[in-house]
Amino acid sequence: AAMYEIKVRSIPDHYFKGFWSEWSPSYYFRTPEINNSSGLSLSYGPVSLIIRRLWNIFVRNQERI
């Protein structure tokens, strides 16, 4: 198992110009222990969680613009 911390920030691009946002609050998660040969399928859960979390942060930042 491993412990991860995610922080993101954004900057408007293309038509919108601007400055970097403040860093988001930290989000922590731990990957599960892999004790069998099907461990690859267990990694999809944390990966999809990260993608959903980053998407939610991105959408919230777009609403501020």
Image (cartoon, rainbow, N blue to C red):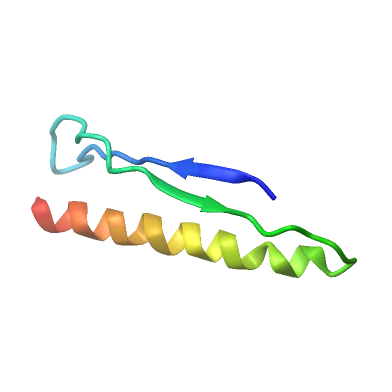
| Residue 56 x, y percent position in the rendering | 31, 61
Q: Is 52 positioned to the left or the right of 2 in the image?
A: left
In the image, farthest residue toward the left: 65
Picture quadrant of residue 63: bottom left
Nearest the eye: 19 or 46: 46
Q: Is residue 53 left or right of residue 25?
A: right
Q: Give the number of marks.
A: 0
Q: Is residue 20 above or below residue 25?
A: above
Residue 15 on image: x %, y % = 15, 43
Q: Residue at x 13, y 35 (%)?
A: 17
Q: Position of residue 58 (x, y in %)?
A: 29, 54
Q: Is 12 or 4 nearer to us in this picture? A: 4
Vertical side of 57 occupied by 15: above or below = above
Name of the residue lying farthest toward the right? 37
Kindly indicate the quadrant of the structure image that contains residue 47.
Answer: bottom right
Q: Residue at x 13, y 33 (%)?
A: 18
In the image, farthest residue toward the top:
19
Q: Residue at x 20, y 34 (%)?
A: 22
Identify the image quadrant of residue 46: bottom right
Q: Is residue 63 above or below residue 41?
A: above
**Residue at figure coordinates x 68%, y 59% from the top left:** 32
Q: Is residue 16 left or right of residue 1?
A: left
Horizontal side of residue 51 vs 44, given as left or right: left
Q: Nearer the viewer, residue 28 or 38?
A: 28
